[in-house]
């Protein structure tokens, strides 16, 4: 899909929500430059972090902690609500996110007493904490807001 068509589709799908365009290592080449050429502004940067789970040492965790794959809309709402979306916009964000075909994306959430208590999304402030736990930066995502 050409960038202009993708911008129009994003505006249509996300109308009424606060949204940003994430550009990372998995984006089409030239996406950031194309957005800037169309008036977008850089509004932040967020590290994408990963860890080889086969090398993680045993951690002291709550006995009833369950790590769950997030795939259903209800699970995604619990996963998405702490990310700061405005009231009423979570449903459209969830529908859009689950409607995208990312075969390699696995979303995980920590569940204690039936409540989602943890998801991992690193910020620049949180990056040192995640590094101490063994995570490594694999990409830095640029967020640009289409104007």
Image (spheres, rainbow, N blue to C red):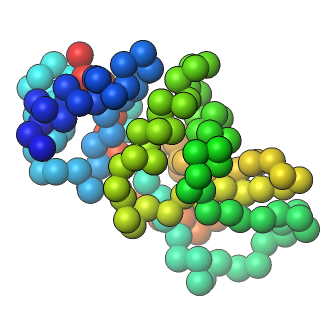
Q: Nearer the viewer, residue 23 or 17?
A: 17
Q: Nearer the viewer, residue 43 or 28?
A: 28
Image height check: is 141 above or below 38? below
Locate the C terminus and report the quarter of the image it occupies.
top left
Q: Which residue is located at x 44 percent, y 20 percent?
A: 17
Image height check: is 53 above or below 98? below
- Where is residue 18 shown, x and y percent of the image? 44, 20
- Where is residue 90 shown, x and y percent of the image? 55, 29
User: Does residue 147 appear in this view?
Assistant: yes
Locate the N terminus and report the quarter of the image it occupies.
top left
User: Does residue 120 appear in this view?
Assistant: no
Picture quarter containing residue 9?
Answer: top left
Q: Which residue is located at x 36 percent, y 58 percent?
A: 102
Give the tally of numbered discs: 0
Image height check: is 107 above or below 142? below
Image height check: is 44 above or below 107? above
Asked whether, in this view, residue 121 is left or right of residue 111, the answer is left
Asked whether, in this view, residue 41 is left or right of residue 56, the answer is left
Q: Nearer the viewer, residue 126 or 22?
A: 22
Q: Which residue is located at x 15 percent, y 41 percent?
A: 31
Picture quarter containing residue 74?
Answer: top right
Asked whether, in this view, residue 116 is left or right of residue 113, the answer is left
- Where is residue 57 shown, x and y percent of the image? 71, 79
- Where is residue 85 shown, x and y percent of the image? 55, 26
Q: Which residue is located at x 78 percent, y 72 percent?
A: 59
């Amino acid at each position: 899909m050409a960038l202009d068509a993708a911008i129009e589709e994003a505006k249509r799908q996300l109308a009424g929500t606060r949204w940003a365009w994430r550009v990372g290592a998995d984006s089409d080449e030239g996406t950031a430059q194309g957005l800037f050429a169309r008036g977008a502004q850089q509004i932040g940067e967020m590290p994408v972090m990963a860890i080889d789970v086969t090398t993680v040492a045993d951690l002291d965790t709550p006995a009833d902690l369950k790590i769950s794959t997030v795939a259903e809309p209800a699970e995604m709402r619990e996963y998405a609500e702490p990310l700061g979306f405005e009231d009423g916009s979570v449903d459209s964000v969830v529908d859009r996110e689950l409607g995208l075909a990312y075969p390699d994306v696995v979303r995980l959430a920590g569940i204690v007493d039936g409540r989602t208590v943890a998801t991992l999304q690193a910020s620049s402030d949180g990056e040192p904490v995640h590094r101490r736990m063994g995570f490594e930066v694999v990409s830095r995502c640029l967020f640009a807001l289409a104007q």
